[in-house]
Image (cartoon, grey):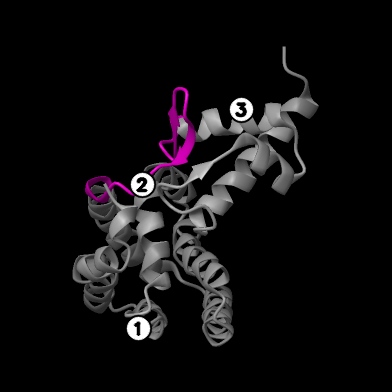
Amino acid sequence: MASTNTINLSDQAYQFIKTKIMNLDYAPGAKISTTSISEASSLGKTPVREALLRLSQEQLVNMVPQSGAYVAKINLKIAQESRFTRELIETEIMQQAAATIQATDIDWLNQNLKAQTAALQQKNLSRFFELDNAFHRYFYVMTNHDLSWNWLELININLDRFRRLRIENNHLKWQPLIDQHQTLLTAVINHDLTDVRFHELMHIRLMLAEEDSVQQAFPTYFV
């Protein structure tokens, strides 16, 4: 039976590698070695190997016999299906939020938007992405659907990686994302269900409009 310490080290290695992949420090298609990860993370090779195995089960890493571990490329078909699933769920979540939002929720969401703007000004892409996710997650938690968010996170790996690339794309601006967040929040605060649905769909369907631009900017990152 594995010790608690071994499990904790494996979890640390898993979080380290996954964060590197999601933040594009390890680019799609790149080869990653157990030794280099072990040195970079200050963790042993055994927990690193265990973490790579776990990430391969989540299709973030490809283990190639006699060759090594490679960061999986982004599967655009899966990303598209994930976006479609999230659209169906999140439009309902946002309408529920419009019926239940409180002053404390508005304060938190406004602070999040201010932090998004600060990240934009500082050109801190990883922080912006983190805040973007936190903004959306808040509505799920607020409406008691945090389990739905957790489930979506499991199937949204390819979509989230696409979204992360989107903010790396120099041809696409960040400000429209913040503007859409603000417009959506305003509609929720006003309890305007028609506007909520319209602006949520506009936001969640942004991928459809920007897909070609992202692919052209990073042609080797997709399968």
Would you name the residue on which mark 3 appears? 50
Where residue 12 sits in the image (x, y, percent)?
Answer: 69, 41
At a point 73% along the width and 43% down the height, the residue shown is: 39
Taking the view exactly as shown, the residue that stands out farthest to the bottom is 121
Residue 60 belongs to the span the image colors magenta? yes
* Alpha carbon separation for disc pair 3 and 2: 21 Å
Between discs 2 and 1, the one toward the N terminus:
2
* Amino acid type assigned to the residue bearing label 3 in the image: Glu
Res 136 visible: yes
Query: As drawn, is 205 to the left or to the right of 163?
Result: left
Between discs 3 and 1, the one toward the N terminus:
3
Would you name the residue on which mark 1 appears? 176
At a point 28% along the width and 79% down the height, the residue shown is: 192
* Alpha carbon separation for disc pair 3 and 1: 40 Å
Residue 206 belongs to the span the image colors magenta? no
Would you name the residue on which mark 2 appears? 73
- When the figure is inspected, residue 88 is found, relative to residue 185, above or below; the finding is above
- Start-end of magenta stretch: 57-78
* Amino acid type assigned to the residue bearing label 2 in the image: Lys
Whether residues under marks 2 and 1 lie with C-beta atoms below 8 angstroms apart, the answer is: no
State the residue in front, 36 or 53: 36
